[in-house]
Amino acid sequence: METRKFKDLTIRDAFMFAAVMSDSEICRKVLELALRIPISEVHVQTEKTMAYHSEYHGVRLDVYASDANRTRFNVEMQVKLQKFLPKRSHYYHDQIDRDVLLTGEPYENLPDTYVIFICDFDPFGDGLYRYSTGTYCEETGSRVDDGVQTIYLNTHGKNREDIPEELLQFLDYVKNTGREEEISTTDPFVRHLQDTIDKIKLDRGMEERYMLLEEMMRNVKREGKLEGKLEGNAEGKQECLLSVLKSKFSVSDELKEKIVSETDIDKLNVWFQLLLKVSSIEDFEQNM
């Protein structure tokens, strides 16, 4: 599959979506549009990997955020039809909950979690722009307040009269940008989104990071290590990190040994993100 040029990326592309959503104010606004509730200031992490055991399926979240109340939010851009999104949501909620309740804490302290899928397809086929799911009592039909909710936003909905105008403008933008010659909306948030993307495309550092990431993904696929890199296999991450390092710099035996002896997946992820930013092997080693 041919790599998309950096200048052609839209908000539907994973790299650009993560770059835009790293702006905490943009992320907060998207959360408010999706959830229809006011959101306080949020702390955002993009491309967060959660893997608690090398033998089990880890997850790589596009956007992971939390607010002052410890509420957790996961936002995912989905451009290809996915048949098992509810199952994926189930697993994402489970992974997010694993590190938020300390030993001895009561269950009442477990924060609420929201998983939001922005879909460039209709996930359920009912023509709605927004589907929300939660836990209900089958006998009474009442909502169970377990703090778990999943929102599916559909850019190809049909019930425009039921949806707030701001949300419609946002979903129209996601659907049409890059497919229509011009985005003519005057909605201030949509214009801000496009202005932010335009600025990102002028950032040479971001373009280099994108190209490096794409090259890494091609190398990993060729080596058959994609699952290990994305799903939490430490050995796969070590090999991937070394492969990209060697493509950019001369790697000493000491540095190689340090990487292959590291089994902490989170630390390997931090090193990889560092690699995308540094311009010399000295900078990389000093900041490890």
Image (spheres, grey):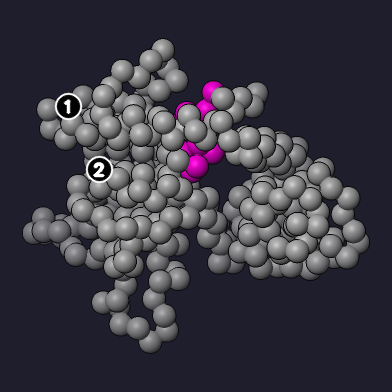
Asked whether residue 62 appears in the rendered view, the answer is yes
Is residue 212 in the magenta section? no
Q: Provide the secondary structure element on which disc 2 rests.
A: helix
Q: Provide the secondary structure element on which disc 1 rests.
A: helix
Q: Residue at x 88, y 65 (%)?
A: 254
- Residue nearer the viewer, 189 or 62: 189
Give the percent coordinates (x, y) of residue 268: 67, 61
- Circle 1 residue: 160
Crowd class of label 1 (few under 14; some 14 to 19; many from 20; radius 10 Å): few
- Residue nearer the viewer, 168 or 100: 168
Q: Amino acid at mark 2?
A: Leu
- Circle 2 residue: 33
Q: Which residues are magenta?
A: 8-19
Asked whether residue 239 appears in the rendered view, the answer is no
Q: Residue at x 59, y 66 (%)?
A: 53
Give the percent coordinates (x, y) of residue 30: 31, 43
- In the image, residue 102 sits, relative to residue 233, either above or below, namely below
Give the percent coordinates (x, y) of residue 35: 24, 48
Left or right? Give the position of 39 relative to 180: left
Q: Amino acid at mark 1?
A: Arg
| Total labels drawn | 2
Is residue 18 in the magenta section? yes
Give the percent coordinates (x, y) of residue 120: 38, 30
Mark 2 vs mark 1: which is more N-terminal?
A: 2
- Which quadrant is the N terminus positioned in? top right
Q: Are marks 2 and 1 in contact (CB under 8 Å)?
A: no
Q: Residue at x 40, y 66 (%)?
A: 97
